[in-house]
Amino acid sequence: IILYSNKILGKLIVPFKNWIPFASDLSLERIIWKVAEQLFKEVQKTYQEKTQIPDDLLIALRFVFGSCALQALDLVDQRSVTCVSSPSGRRAYQVMGGSGLLYTCYTYCHYCPCPAFSYTVLRRNESLLCKHILAAYLSQAMGLFQQETLSDQHMSNILSGRAAATDT
Amino acid sequence: IAPLQNQENTCSGTYHSKIALVIIGVTSLQKIKFAYPRSLEDLLQDVASLHEAVSGSATAPTSLIIVDGLECYLRMPGLSSGLQQAQLSSAAHVSALLFDTAAFLTQTLEERAASLAPCRVLASFQPVGEGHARDPSAQDPVISVLDRYFQVRCTLDRRWQPSPAAAGPQDMWHVCLCGVGITGAFLAEDEENPGRPQEWTLVIGADGSMEFTPRNVDHVSYLTGALTSGLTKLQIENLPAQLSSCEAQWFE
């Protein structure tokens, strides 16, 4: 009901009307995530056309992700996101946090080693994502990320948490 | 992948390999790689390295990853029991890495041949306090983290009490499948409630024979379908002969 009251999210949620009647059988988190995915597509489309994010989309981002949205956009603005890849084709995103620490986020699955992810996402279940994962999504949508190629072994070390991209 | 057994840390870590030897042939066995990481860090490194075998190699990518005894890695000495938040983060890390790796391997499998099945992940986890008196309402917080990543959970509970008429010398278990990933073979054609738990009673006879009975008669029609699907068959056939008092297993 709250989602439908918002103009932008109401528009975004239209494609999901068919399965909304079964919403009681799915977790609310998964439904909101479907909305978030649509939101990223809208950001991508709009940014490609206008090279900026209009206010209504910013409001929608703030609505879904809370204070994380502005923090993530700030990270994207500072080009803090790097897409690392290796010859095997494996990719991951590394985000330089405000403290200068480097956080590795996976491509297909949500995980970030930052304290906020552990506390607000895993423990309190209060957020969908932390600002680092959201920054990785937004940087992809806006095409504003750096790229770095690593060896397969180095990529393995990054994925396992043994090393950061700039360690060697 | 299974924990390395030692005297200080006795986890049920080897039954998959013993049973696998009986079920599958020698040729198929050559395609299976057994790994026994000593710590969570080694487990993460092993899983993170799976993509290296794909690079410039004709070797078929891994199509199934089984991790036995996740609890052994999440409660090793290096991980203080008081640091629950660190434990939850570790559970999330290993789960996310497993599924990120499986997604990458699935993509690689599809690139090589569209007919190849996706890479799957199976893991077992025994909640804290099993084998002792426990409060049924108190769920191990790690389970909520695992549920976030694994779309289907299969819970095996030996403490379920059958009706007095059915009571006997057999070993009885309550098997329950739940999660948002319950679709396809698990559901009847007219099933309107995806994600609804599916429950069976498992009786293990003295000779090791196993018999599954749906707890809801309406579900008989699709029990057969579930048993003939690849993953479920593997899951059921690999049940250890001597299960611990209660064990939960998840699969994608």
Image (cartoon, coloured by chain):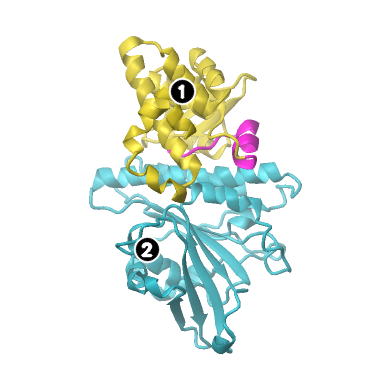
Chain colours: A yellow, B cyan
Q: Residue at x 44, y 21 (%)?
A: A139
Name the subunit of mark 1.
A
Kind of residue at disc 2: Phe
The answer to which image quadrant residue B192 occupies is: bottom left
Residue B119 drawn at (x, y percent): 37, 51
Q: Say what secondary structure mark 1 lies in.
A: helix
Where does the magenta region start and end? A108-124
Q: Which residue is mark 1?
A: A60
Furthest-right residue in this view: B82
Q: Which residue is mark 2?
A: B186
Residue A36 drawn at (x, y percent): 43, 31
Kind of residue at disc 1: Ala
User: Which is more foreground, mark 2 or mark 1?
Assistant: 1
Whether residues under marks 2 and 1 lie with C-beta atoms below 8 angstroms apart, the answer is no
Residue A122 falls inside the magenta stretch: yes
Q: Are marks 2 and 1 on the same chain?
A: no
Q: Please name whichever residue, B70 or A1, is drawn nearer the observer in this view of the structure.
A: A1
The quarter of the rendered structure image containing the C terminus of chain B is bottom left
